[in-house]
Amino acid sequence: MATYQPVANPAALIAATAAAIRPADREAAARADRLQDRLTKPPGALGRMESLATRIAGITAQERPHLDRRLVVVAAGDHGVTAQGVSAFPAEVTAQMVANFLAGGAAINVLAHHAGARVRVVDAGVRGETPDHPDLLRLRLGPGTDNISRGPAMTHALAERAIAEGIALFDRERATEGVDIVGLGEMGIGNSTSAAAIIAAVTGLPPRTVTGRGTGVDDAHYELKVAAIESALHVNNPDRADGIALLATLGGFEIGVLAGAYLAAAAARVPAVIDGVISGAAALVAGAIAPEAAESFLASHLSVEPGHMATLEYLRLEPVLDLNMRLGEGSGAALAISLCVAACRLLDEMATFDEAGVSDSDTAVEPES
């Protein structure tokens, strides 16, 4: 099990991290664009792979970004709202899946290995026992959140700590093994209900519009899920401009940890890859705390969960993939990391027309007839 020192002053760490965030580097992006036009291909021939590399150049402030050190964070937490019958699976599945992640048997393990990324698993607040393991960071902020349909998910102090611990986790990973790109994933029975509540609060869309089937609930349980979200919004009256309060009223411990990781990545100019709807809700929390953080976000895929599309539209992000996925765990993020690496390698490793001795469209001479 990974050891750590709890953050001594969460509020100060959050404030300092948010203050360190800067907009994307427009000049680095422009230089990358100009380089794209000199590579041995017709202009725009690599399509969105070119714009992806250019965006990463702006995030990293590097004309030729290298994404050699790749990390996927999978944060897990339980949710008290499961008492409302919002999930097709029992709460104990969260702890069981954490054990599966640590044993290497989950989809994220396979996809992260394919992407050349290491996986850090976080017990942010799992109700059941999680195993001792060197790849597990056991925060245990609580045995799951309280029932958001009846009151706040957690105290303001716990919300601050969850976010600060996510910042500290990212900073430690970057200081020890390095991080050039990070994918953010999660696990938690009931967390799609919490995520939909956050998305509805931030976007202003009706709960039914942003609520999906999550783990595959039937019609009766879906209605319970929508009702729980409507109740949560009414009871808590969340302030969408206050990210910490938003997390405290509607969120989950794992959502808070991911929100902190987004903030830390943005402050370090590291691309942060959003996975699915819960990861997207965490991005909304981070964006409410520091709006410029969103310039460091990349959307990995378009989940079939309706709240995910609403989230990406709100953040003005275009997903790299659309594969009808809704697994979570960081699975879509890991797949997109592979494409991010490929896009940056094309930008960095392809020869220019001058280097290859190839005539480009501006110098080519039409053959005589």
Image: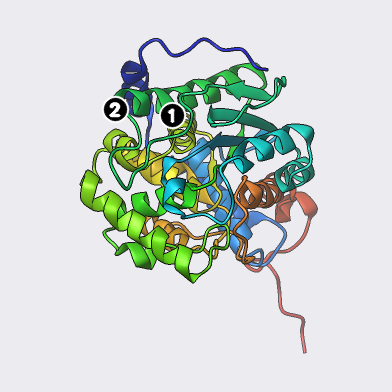
Q: How many marks?
A: 2
- Amino acid found under the numbered disc labelled 2: His
Residue at left offset 29%, top offset 49%: 232
Residue at left offset 73%, top offset 48%: 107
Horizontal side of 232 relative to 216 (left or right) equals: left
Give the vertical position of 152 relative to 196 (above or below).
above
Crowding around mark 1 (Cα neighbors within 10 Å: few <14, some 14 to 19, many 20+) is many
Q: Nearer the N terminus, badge 2 or badge 1?
A: 2
Looking at the picture, tell me which residue is in the foreground, 306 or 361.
306
Q: Which residue is under mark 2?
A: 156
Q: Nearer the viewer, mark 2 or mark 1?
A: 2
Residue 25 falls in image quadrant: top left
Give the vertical position of 323 relative to 228 (above or below).
below
Q: Is residue 185 visible?
A: no
Q: Which residue is under mark 1?
A: 267
Residue 325 place in picture, x, y as percent: 62, 61
Q: Which mark, by number, is residue 134?
A: none
Whole-Å distance between the Cαs marked 2 and 1? 23 Å
Residue at left offset 25%, top offset 46%: 240
* SS assignment at label 1: helix
Residue 297 place in picture, x, y as percent: 48, 45
* SS assignment at label 2: helix
Residue at left offset 60%, top offset 65%: 322
Residue 132 place in picture, x, y as percent: 70, 20
The quadrant in which the N terminus is found is top right
Give the vertical position of 40 relative to 274 (above or below).
below
Residue 336 place in picture, x, y as percent: 64, 51
Asked which colour scheme the image uses, the reply is: rainbow
Horizontal side of 163 relative to 353 (left or right) equals: left
Looking at the picture, tell me which residue is in the foreground, 12 or 143.
143
Looking at the picture, tell me which residue is in the foreground, 252 or 176.
252
- Amino acid found under the numbered disc labelled 1: Ala
